[in-house]
C-alpha cells in the first residue's frame, strides 16, 4: 500500500513513497524543477500528427497497420497506450521543453510505473532524453533506439532483456538492468550530481553508470512500438521527474 512521507532536502519539501526515499512523488520550493504530467488527452492520434502539442508533448506516430494510435486515460488514473497492428507501429513522445540536466549539487529523480501487454514482441523506452530526439526508437528496418543524449531504460523487440542506458552524442553505456514482463514495473533512476546515475527496478538497485553521461538539457521521453504483427498496449501509472537546482 502506498505510504507517502515528507522530508526536507536543500531547502525543498519532498514527498516520497516510503520506504523508497528517492522515489520523489512531488516537491515544493524555489529550487525545485519538476514535471509531473497530467494525462488529459483522450482519443486517436493519426499518423504524422503532433496532436498533443497543446498538452506539452511532441508526438511522432507510426500507424502502418489497421487503426490509429490511441491514448486513453483510465478511471483509476492510469493511461492506456494502444498501437496500431503492424511491426514498428507505435509512438515516440517527448516533452516540448527540456527542463532537466545533470549538474553538480542538483539531485535528480526520474521514474515511471508501467505495464506491458507483450514483454517480448514490443520495443520500449522511458527516461530523460534531448528534446531533439524526435524518433526515440526506430520506426522501420530494425528495432533499435535512436537517442543522441539521455538517461533511459530500454527494451527492444524479440527479447525481454532490458537495459539502463546513458548516452552522450550517440555514444552509449548500457547496463543490464531489468527483464521485461507483463506485470506492473517501476523503472527509476537517481543522480546526486553529474558524475553517477543509479538505476532501480521495482525499488531495487540494479546498477549505475559513470560514463557517457549526457551534458545537454533533457525532457521526459517515452516510446512504445509493436515488435511484430498485432497491436500491443502499455499502461502508464505514473511518470515524472524532479530536480533540486541551486539558484544564482
Image (cartoon, rainbow, N blue to C red):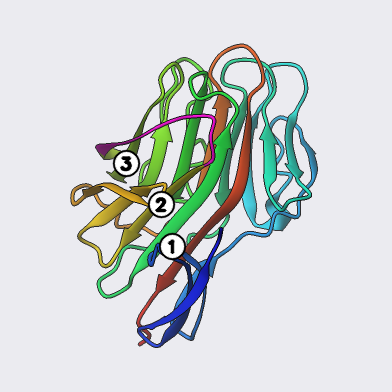
Residue assigned mark 3:
165
Residue 11 among magenta residues = no
Q: Is residue 142 above or below residue 9?
A: above
Report the span colored magenta: 174-184
- Could you tell me which residue is drawn at 36 percent across and 42 percent down? 148
- Could you tell me which residue is drawn at 34 percent across and 59 percent down? 190
SS under mark 1: loop
Residue assigned mark 2:
188
- Could you tell me which residue is drawn at 42 percent across and 70 percent down? 243
User: Where does residue 105 sit, x and y in percent of width and height?
Assistant: 27, 75
Distance in Å between CA atoms under marks 1 and 2: 8 Å
Q: Is residue 32 above or below residue 219?
A: below
Q: Are marks 3 and 1 in contact (CB under 8 Å)?
A: no
User: Where does residue 203 sit, x and y in percent of width and height?
Assistant: 39, 52
User: Where does residue 232 sit, x and y in percent of width and height?
Assistant: 63, 24
Query: Which residue is most to the front?
Result: 1
Mark sitting on residue 23: 1
Amino acid at each position: 500500500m502506498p505510504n507517502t512521507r515528507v522530508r526536507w532536502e536543500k531547502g525543498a519539501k519532498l514527498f516520497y513513497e516510503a520506504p523508497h526515499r528517492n522515489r520523489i512523488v512531488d516537491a515544493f520550493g524555489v529550487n525545485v524543477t519538476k514535471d509531473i504530467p497530467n494525462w488529459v488527452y483522450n482519443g486517436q492520434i493519426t499518423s504524422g500528427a503532433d496532436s498533443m502539442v497543446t498538452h506539452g508533448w511532441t508526438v511522432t506516430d507510426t500507424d502502418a497497420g489497421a487503426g490509429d494510435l490511441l491514448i486513453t486515460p483510465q478511471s483509476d488514473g492510469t493511461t492506456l497506450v494502444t498501437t496500431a497492428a503492424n511491426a514498428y507501429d507505435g509512438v515516440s513522445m517527448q516533452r516540448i521543453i527540456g527542463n532537466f540536466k545533470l549538474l553538480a549539487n542538483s539531485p535528480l529523480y526520474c521514474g515511471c510505473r508501467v505495464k506491458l501487454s507483450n514483454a517480448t514482441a514490443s520495443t520500449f523506452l522511458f527516461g530523460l532524453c534531448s528534446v531533439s530526439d524526435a524518433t526515440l526508437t526506430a520506426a522501420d528496418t530494425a528495432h533499435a533506439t535512436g537517442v543522441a543524449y539521455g538517461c533511459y531504460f530500454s527494451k527492444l523487440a524479440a527479447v525481454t532483456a532490458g537495459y539502463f542506458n546513458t548516452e552522450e552524442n550517440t555514444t552509449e553505456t548500457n547496463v543490464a538492468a531489468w527483464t521485461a514482463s507483463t506485470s506492473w514495473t517501476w523503472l527509476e533512476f537517481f543522480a546526486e550530481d553529474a558524475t553517477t546515475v543509479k538505476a532501480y527496478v521495482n525499488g531495487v538497485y540494479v546498477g549505475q553508470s559513470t560514463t557517457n553521461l549526457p551534458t545537454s538539457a533533457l525532457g521526459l521521453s517515452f516510446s512504445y512500438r509493436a515488435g511484430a504483427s498485432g497491436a500491443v498496449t502499455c499502461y502508464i501509472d505514473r511518470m515524472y521527474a524532479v530536480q533540486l537546482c541551486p539558484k544564482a
